[in-house]
Amino acid sequence: MTDQGVREAADLLRRALRAVIFTGAGMSAESGVPTFRDALTGLWQQFDAQALATPQAFHDDPALVWGWYEWRRTAVARARPNAGHVAVAAIEARVPHAVVVTQNVDDLHERAGSVDPVHLHGSLFAPRCSACARPAWAADGLGEEPTDGRRVTPPSCGHCSAPIRPGVVWFGEALPEDALDTAVDAASSCDVLLTVGTSGLVYPAAEIPQVAARFGAAVIQVNPQETPLDAVTAVNLRGPATEVLPALVRAAWEADDRA
């Protein structure tokens, strides 16, 4: 991250009339949320995370899959939004028409103050029936965290008695149509797209910054590492979201706050 890069990105955001803030796993990792492909703790290490994240895995052993997702959900519930999440909410509040689009299945953006972020990959806090797809229950009463790889029988749907499933997008499933349409519409009409903590490798979500670039938006990337999105970025800010995003907010609007 350079001072010149921060100033350039801040100027783009300050002048934007429409913005998309697009976030990935790197954003939540700084709050201590394990990324999907991280090594798991305890006996969960004996399971392949990608093998558990499929409709077939839930069909074959719903208690194992539900237990793993309960472990993830309780871990997220104990995490706290970081300075990057707070900065995203500040940007959203400053730009007249801003939309937060996230690949993350946690609720850290909401808890930091973002309004109705678009969850492309669903949410750990929106379980639904595996048969009739009706929303199941508000996940506000968290039980004991299943840290030892034990199976937890999922609750049953009150409408059709089928097992409740996690409200996330599994491998082999399509992204939620409404969420994807909203994200594409926002990306195709924005002035600036700020992409934070995403590898640019998980499709179709990774196409969102590409859409913005094709329609003429300036793409600002915040990431410690090189990514495939480097080729379409107007400004690349190398560094962690917890450092870069607060600096970006200060550079864009600190003078206004002092006035």
Image (cartoon, rainbow, N blue to C red):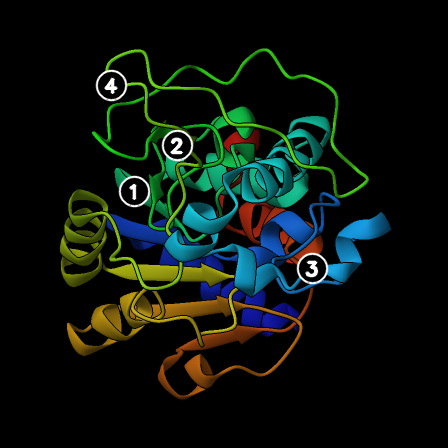
Residue that numbered label 1 is attached to: 98
Of all residues, the one furthest to the front in this rendering is: 60
Q: Which of marks 4 and 2 is nearer the N terminus?
A: 2
Which of the two marks, 3 or 1, is nearer to us in this view?
Answer: 3
Q: Which residue is the site of mark 4?
A: 160
Q: Choose the circle earlier in sequence order: 4 or 1.
A: 1
How many angstroms separate mark 4 from mark 2 (CA)?
A: 42 Å
Residue 5: mark in rendering: none
**Mark 2 and mark 1 in contact (Cβ < 8 Å)?**
yes
Whether residue 197 is visible to the viewer of this picture, yes or no, is: no
Q: Name the residue under label 3.
A: 47
How much space separates mark 4 and mark 1, taking CA atoms? 39 Å
| 245 with respect to 109 (left or right) | right
The tag earlier along the polypeptide, 3 or 1, is 3
Q: Position of residue 13 (x, y in %)?
A: 38, 54
Report the residue at 67% width, 72% height from top: 224
Work out whether mark 3 precedes mark 2 in sequence or the reverse, and give the earlier one.
3
Residue at left offset 34%, top offset 61%: 193
**Mark 3 or 4, nearer chain start:** 3
Of the two numbered discs 3 and 4 in the rendering, the one whose residue sits closer to the viewer: 4
- State the SS at label 3: loop
Q: Whole-Å distance between the Cαs marked 3 and 1? A: 39 Å
Q: Few, some or many C-alpha atoms within 10 Å of disc 3 (few <14, some 14-19, many ≥20)?
A: some
- Give the residue at mark 2: 93
Q: Quadrant of the N terminus?
A: bottom right
Identity of the amino acid at label 1? Ala
User: For numbered disc 2, what is the local secondary structure?
Assistant: helix
